[in-house]
Every structure is written in C-alpha cells, then in structure tokens.
Amino acid sequence: MRTVLMADDEPIVSKSFNRVLAGNGYAVIGARSGQEALDKLAAEEYDMVFIDRYTAQVVRLFGTFPSL
C-alpha cells in the first residue's frame, strides 16, 4: 500500500483528503504542523507528501511559496 503524509492544521481539510486518498488505496498519515511533518519525514519514507503552504510552521521554516 502506498503511504501519504498529509500535513495540515485544519482538521476539516485533513479529514477530506484522508477520505479521498484512503478511498483510493492510500494509507494516510497525518501531521498537524510543519514541524511534526518534518519529524515524520526524518523517521520514515512516504510515497507522497501534501503540505498546507499556509501552516504557520511551514511559513516560518520555508517562507512563502509562490501560487501554483
């Protein structure tokens, strides 16, 4: 099974992503902050990573990201 790390500080967004991804065969691991996501990335490999670019700790760690 493919594993996805989902980092978002808004529970409704995480729950929606989890439902869609899990329904398509992915194991979803959640992180509620940028730091928690980094800690999980250091400890384990993931097939995909989704990070909310507006999570406060992500902005402090990486700065802002350009719009896609």
Image: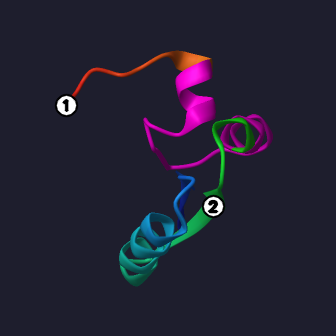
Q: Quadrant of the C terminus?
A: top left
> Does 27 sit above or below residue 44?
below
Circle 2 residue = 30
Looking at marks 2 and 1 on the same chain, the residue that comes earlier in the sequence is marked by: 2
Classify 10 Å Cα crowding around label 1: few (below 14), some (14-19), many (20 and above).
few
Callouts 2 and 1 close, C-beta under 8 Å: no
Secondary structure beneath label 2: strand
Residue 21 image-quadrant placement: bottom left
> Does 21 sit above or below residue 10?
below
Please state which amino acid type lies under the numbered disc 2: Gly
Q: Is residue 43 magenta?
A: yes
Is any part of residue 1 visible from this angle? no
At x 58%, y 48%, the residue is 46
State the residue in front, 43 or 53.
53
Please state which amino acid type lies under the numbered disc 1: Leu
Secondary structure beneath label 1: loop
Circle 1 residue = 68
At x 40%, y 74%, the residue is 16
Region of the chain picked out in magenta, as a range: 37-60
